[in-house]
Amino acid sequence: MKPVVKIFIALIFIGSFASQFSSCSSCNNPNHVIVDTIKPKPVVTVHVPDFDADSSYKYCNDQVKFGPRIPGTKSQQQCAAYLEKMLNLYCDTVYVQKANVKVYDGSEKPMINLIGSINPKAKKRVLLLAHWDTRPWSDRDANGPKKQYDGADDGGSGVGILIECAKQFQKQKPNVGVDILFCDVEDYGPPEFETKWDEKDQYALGTQYWAKNPHTTNYRAFYGILLDMTGAVNARFPKEAFSMRYAPSVVNEFWNHAQSLGFGNYFVNESAGAITDDHYYVNTINGTPTIDIINLSAETKTGFAPHWHTQTDNMDLIDRTTMKAVGQTLLQMIYYEPGDENL
Ligand SMILES: [Zn+2]
């Protein structure tokens, strides 16, 4: 890992070499060389802080210790208070949205969205989001599909990575404004063991609410990045189809940064099917071009990683190396982004 990146050195060297030693066209003598006096441009460096994977692991574990963060439970209330505290530590402005949302069976559940803004006055903004709720059932687990589970990866890991990013943004402000959205009630879609319910628009309820009621008037970011299931050992992040439909240049830029950092084994150059995740509603309701970084498998029937919605989604499968790959790439992407002057 190289926290200081000097990308322009090679280009400047080649450019100055060419201008200093171009042959003389006016006298037709190929050996006559013009040496001009153009001074080399200053080298532009971007300092990208080191993402601390140990911290992000701890922030993930902190959430898991509250128990499953199921809407309507005490664990939800306790974890919301923890997330609000962490955002207040590292962000300039914090917003909390509370509302009741109707879930698939018509019952109402309390929703708590938390938003932390960094550089609140910057016009050019990037939205980073992850859902923090836990699905109420491990309905993809053959052993006890009605049982609860920890949701360490499905919810916890993305939030843990974003808290660590917020900490770095506070120490070294990026050029752009950043808004971190911890969205609630993503995973309360109808369970597999109840087949009578319609799935359409039953997921990502917190993000649907936020997209219709953003934390500031007429909010729209330059682009958005969603993290979902981004902490498991040997994770694999192909290019998800809605991300490629709505924000292909953001996907490709992120994957290029990952590969430049040596994380090409995680961020594979493969396409994957469309996932109706939080980013779908940010794209279609809010209009911010937003990508989904999500662990998908080419070997499972569902297309998701094998621990998806099972009791094996616990801290045992959370891997600091995966969190480092995602978090360091995310930091590099944000710190490379020019600010308002490039709008
Ligand atoms: Zn889920």
Image (tube, helix red, strand yellow):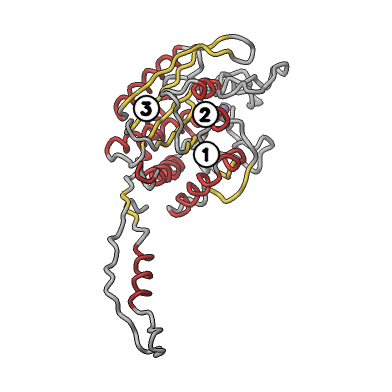
Residue at 66 percent of width and 23 percent of height: 200
Q: Is 242 placed above or below 270 here? A: above
Indicate if the residue with disc 2 has its beta carbon within 8 Å of ligand 1: no
Q: Position of residue 289 (x, y in %)?
A: 52, 37
SS for tag 1?
A: strand
Residue at 33 percent of width and 22 percent of height: 85
Which label is found at residue 116?
3
Residue type at numbered disc 3: Gly
Reading the image, the residue beneath label 1 is 293
* Sooner in the amino-acid sequence: mark 2 or mark 1: 2
- CA separation, marks 3 and 1? 20 Å
Reading the image, the residue beneath label 2 is 286
Q: Examine the rendering and report whether any part of residue 92 can be seen.
A: yes
Q: Is residue 318 left or right of residue 163?
A: right
* Sooner in the amino-acid sequence: mark 2 or mark 3: 3
Q: Position of residue 280 (x, y in %)?
A: 58, 31
- CA separation, marks 2 and 3? 18 Å
Residue type at numbered disc 2: Asn
- CA separation, marks 2 and 1? 19 Å
Q: Examine the rendering and report whether any part of residue 157 can be seen.
A: no
Q: Is residue 296 left or right of residue 61?
A: right
3 or 1: mark nearer the eye: 3
Q: Is 270 placed above or below 209 here? A: below
